[in-house]
Amino acid sequence: MASTDEPATATPAADETPTPRPVDLRLASIHLRTGSFALARAELETMAGHGSLDDDGLLDLAEVRWRTGDLPGAGEAAAAFLASGRDSILALVIAAEATAELGRPGEAR
């Protein structure tokens, strides 16, 4: 028999509660994941212009630029994401492709 003194679910401490992403960033990410690249890019580029992208938004921007053929822009966004101290295989691939495109294959490796 379970004790009635213990809560059914554990509640994270106040400093452990993740901050939810803004709705516009979540929506842009959904558009990216569902293949609506033009819409996702327009949303992400607008947010980038306003300076309202979080780290995951930078990665989404890098991906949508990459998927729409803007390799230099994708490399720039991927580099900004990596400079934030986070790590992602996708960001590394995009940054490497952009570096190789600049004629620096040794550095891309």
Image (spheres, grey):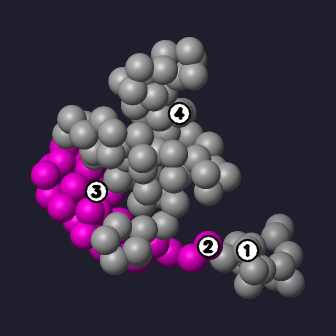
* Residue denoted by label 4: 92
- Which quarter of the picture shows residue 84? bottom right
Q: Which residues are magenta?
A: 18-47
Q: Amino acid at mark 2?
A: Pro
- Could you say which disc has been placed on residue 16 in the image? 1
Q: Nearer the viewer, mark 1 or mark 4?
A: 4
Q: Which residue does the image show at 18% across and 61% down from the upper left? A: 42
- What residue type is disc 4 on? Leu
Report which residue position mark 2 lands on.
Answer: 18
Tell me, yes or no, whether the two marked residues, 2 and 1, touch with CB atoms within 8 Å. yes
Q: Which residue is mark 3?
A: 30
* Real-space Cα separation, disc 1 to disc 3, in angstroms: 25 Å
Query: Which residue of the protein is positioned furthest toward the front in this rendering?
Result: 103
Label 4 vs label 2: CA separation? 26 Å
Q: Position of residue 15 (x, y in %)?
A: 75, 80
Which marked residue is nearer to the observer: mark 4 or mark 2? Answer: 4
Q: Quadrant of the C terminus?
A: top right
Where 54 falls versus 84 (above or below)? below
Q: Earlier in the sequence, mark 3 or mark 4?
A: 3
